[in-house]
Image (cartoon, rainbow, N blue to C red):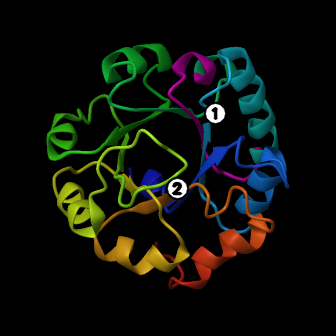
Amino acid sequence: MTALKTRLRLYLVADAFLCTTPDLITTVRLAVANGVTMVQLREKTATTAQRVQMALALKEILIGTGVPLVVNDDVAAAVAADVDGAHIGQGDILPAQARALLGPDKILGLSCETSQAVLAADPALVDYLGLGPVFGTATKTDHAQPIGFDGLARLVALSPLPNVAIGGLKSIHVSDVRECGADGMAVVSAICGQADPAAAARAFSALKPEGTL
């Protein structure tokens, strides 16, 4: 669990739609080389077969980095590509079903937007929680009501599971997220779609002491 908490520190939600110049693979490669510690492939409009191909391409560039790769929503794609795991939301496949498909050794993340969802998350099935949205964000138009940093702190306190804050977060929010007790922060447009993903990733590291969020 400690190792997973470390990997959640700077969690990149890699969105192929946003990553145009540079492209998805280049963005992820540069971001990982400059501080990203975990990658989630999120591509809402793709087919499972297309997600498998994208996941395999990302898996290839992550070899030797120690950075885990999970696939958002599509557990079948995560299994077919044999990546490190999957991340699901409250309206997706049930955690028990996802765990049965993934097996016991893969990572399973679960998005939680409310206290009830956090309390219902079973540590026997789920490895970490995505908590938020902290702020509203254009990268996910169907998100729930933003919870702010006060709400984030409340959700963090409710579960022993590792967790990552998500929702409109940028490098200026590193200290706020850390003060809420979160293990890490997930970012999308703060890195994806930026002309210089390497510099964008380094901006997060520049605002924290070594070894902390």
Q: Which mark is residue 43?
A: 1
Relative vertical location of residue 127 with respect to residue 132 in this rendering, above or below: above
Label 2: element kind: helix
Q: Is residue 150 left or right of residue 18?
A: left
Q: Residue at x 62, y 58 (%)?
A: 189
Q: Decide if residue 201 is on the left or right side of residue 110.
A: right
Give the number of the mark in front: 1 or 2: 1
Q: Position of residue 109 (x, y in %)?
A: 42, 38
What kind of element bears circle 1? loop
Point out which mark residue 118 bears: none
Residue 158 counted in the magenta span: no
Do the CB atoms of the residues marked 1 and 2 lie less than 8 Å apart? no
> Residue 167's spot in the image, x, y percent?
43, 56
* Residue 74, magenta (yes or no): yes
Closer to the N terminus: mark 1 or mark 2? 2
Magenta extent:
63-78
Above or below, comparing residue 77 to residue 151 in the picture? above
Depth check, front residue: 21 or 104: 21
Question: Label 1 vs label 2: CA separation?
Answer: 21 Å
- Could you say where residue 165 lies in the image, as x and y percent from the top left? 39, 58
On the image, which quarter does residue 177 sit in?
A: bottom left
As rendered, which of 98 and 2 lies closer to the eye? 98
Q: Residue at x 34, y 52 (%)?
A: 132
Using the image, determine if residue 3 lies above or below residue 174: above
Q: Name the amino acid type tagged 2.
A: Arg
Among the 4 quarters of the image, the one containing residue 72? top right
Q: Residue at x 23, y 32 (%)?
A: 122
Residue 142: image quadrant is top left
* Residue 14 in the image: above or below residue 41: below
Q: For mark 2, what is the residue?
A: 7
Q: Which amino acid type corresponds to the residue marked 1 in the rendered image?
A: Glu
The residue located at (60%, 24%) in the rendering is 78
